[in-house]
Image: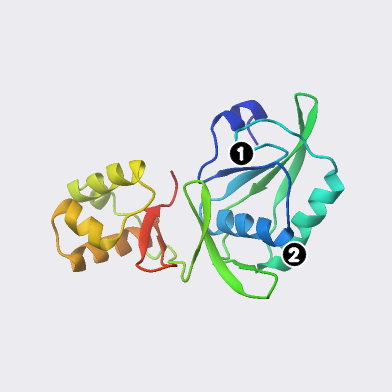
């Protein structure tokens, strides 16, 4: 169940929420849908400006036609999303819910036919060459270790971290830093963004 629109907007854009006043192109919105599906899922509000002001939509059919084009043809494999129309301040807003996918990775297809994986990093949909899927159960003891606690504190204030920066942050070798970051990625805590290089790591959910 989607929260009431004012409380949802008050959260501001983030890893699981994005505002759009309108959908410019199906290809652009495919990136956002793909990123949500590849990460932790999310909600897309159409008819809300970046600053949270409700502008409303002009035509539900016009906007949904682009959404359907994106989910059916510009995201591979295709996505199943749900939507509803909510009226706020007398203006219609489309609320689109995108669940985290069980069929990752999804690729967004651009106008030239190029396929790219997108993930959600804070309030942005960013490209990556590879999506590291969760391969092992979360190690709670590891999550509570001093090095990981320091990492989490850093990532709550910064968008991402590299292995080199991690090594300096907790005074370990580059090899150990890279191994730890990849281990945390395989356990679902982090996402790896390796486009452009060097690889950067960000929190999966902020």
- Kindly indicate the quadrant of the structure image that contains residue 50: top right
Is residue 60 left or right of 45 when viewed as pictured? right
Q: Secondary structure at mark 2?
A: helix
Residue 182: image x %, image y %? Answer: 32, 64
Is residue 173 left or right of 70 when viewed as pictured? left
- Kindly indicate the quadrant of the structure image that contains residue 83: top right
Q: Residue at x 36, y 58 (%)?
A: 201
* Residue nearest the observer in this picture, 192 or 111: 111
Q: Earlier in the sequence, mark 1 or mark 2?
A: 1
* Extreme-top residue of the structure: 89
Q: Residue at x 57, y 53 (%)?
A: 36
Quadrant occupied by the C terminus? top left
- Pair 1/2: label in front: 1
Residue 171: image x %, image y %? Answer: 13, 55
Q: Residue at x 78, y 56 (%)?
A: 66
- Kindly indicate the quadrant of the structure image that contains residue 181: bottom left
Is residue 66 left or right of 7 when viewed as pictured? right
Quadrant occupied by the N terminus? top right
Q: Which residue is mark 2?
A: 72
- Above or below: residue 37 compared with residue 131: above
* Extreme-bottom residue of the structure: 113
Q: Which residue is mark 1?
A: 50
């Amino acid at each position: 169940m989607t929260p009431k629109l004012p409380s949802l907007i008050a959260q501001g854009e983030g890893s699981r929420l994005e505002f759009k006043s309108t959908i410019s192109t199906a290809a652009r919105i495919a990136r956002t849908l793909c990123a949500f599906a590849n990460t932790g899922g999310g909600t897309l509000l159409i008819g809300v400006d970046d600053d949270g002001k409700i502008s409303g939509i002009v035509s539900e059919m016009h906007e949904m036609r682009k959404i359907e084009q994106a989910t059916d043809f510009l995201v591979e494999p295709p996505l199943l999303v749900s939507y509803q129309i909510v009226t706020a301040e007398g203006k219609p807003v489309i609320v689109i819910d995108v669940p985290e996918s069980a069929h990752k990775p999804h690729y967004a297809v651009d106008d030239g036919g190029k396929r790219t994986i997108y993930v959600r990093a804070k309030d942005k949909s960013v490209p990556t060459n590879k999506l590291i899927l969760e391969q092992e159960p979360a190690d709670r003891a590891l999550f509570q270790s001093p090095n990981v606690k320091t990492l989490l504190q850093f990532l709550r204030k910064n968008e991402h971290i590299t292995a080199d920066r991690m090594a300096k942050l907790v005074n370990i070798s580059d090899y150990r830093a890279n191994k730890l970051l990849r281990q945390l990625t395989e356990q679902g805590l982090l996402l790896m963004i390796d486009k452009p290089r060097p690889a950067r790591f960000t929190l999966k959910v902020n």
